[in-house]
Image (tube, rainbow, N blue to C red):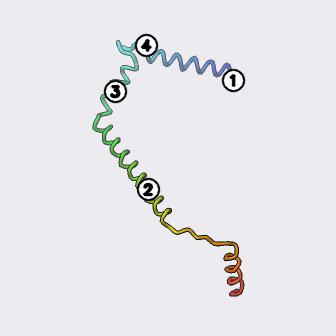
Amino acid sequence: MGFLKFLVWTGCAVGLGVFLAIGEIDGRTPMEYAQREWKRHVQPAKVERVKGELRDALDDAKETVTRTTKQAAAAPRERITNEDRAAIDKIIAQKK
């Protein structure tokens, strides 16, 4: 049953693709209509503005990652041995 569904859906998808590519409505294919609408509504200025915003966001992200990495590298690391930890635990236990 699953294989039959797969074949039917694949056939429908292929049929739709063929219709969009070569089927004509008033002398044009549906793909040509879609391309005309895309060119009419998506103006190059809008695309460039979006590209600029994406570049700014990417630069901000890179800056944040670089700054965070530098801060992590600059912070001193504590090196506590088991003996030091035991001594601290003794001091804490005495205060209670």
Picture residue at 44% right of the left edge, 18% below the top: 20
* Residue 22's disc number: 4
- Graded by Cα atoms within 10 Å as few (under 14), some (14 to 19) or many (20 or more), the crowding at tag 3 reads few
Q: Position of residue 85 (x, y in %)?
A: 68, 75
Measure the alpha-carbon separation of dots 3 and 4. 18 Å
Indicate the secondary structure of the residue bearing disc 4: helix
Indicate the secondary structure of the residue bearing disc 2: helix
Name which of mark 3 and mark 2 comes first in the sequence.
3
| Residue placed furthest toward the bottom | 95
Q: Position of residue 86 (x, y in %)?
A: 71, 77
Type of the residue with mark 2 = Thr
Measure the alpha-carbon separation of dots 3 and 2. 42 Å
Of the 4 image quadrants, the one containing the N terminus is top right
The answer to the question of whether label 3 and label 2 lie on touching residues, with beta carbons closer than 8 A, is: no
Type of the residue with mark 4 = Ile
- The residue labelled by disc 2 is 66
- Graded by Cα atoms within 10 Å as few (under 14), some (14 to 19) or many (20 or more), the crowding at tag 4 reads few
* Residue 2's disc number: 1
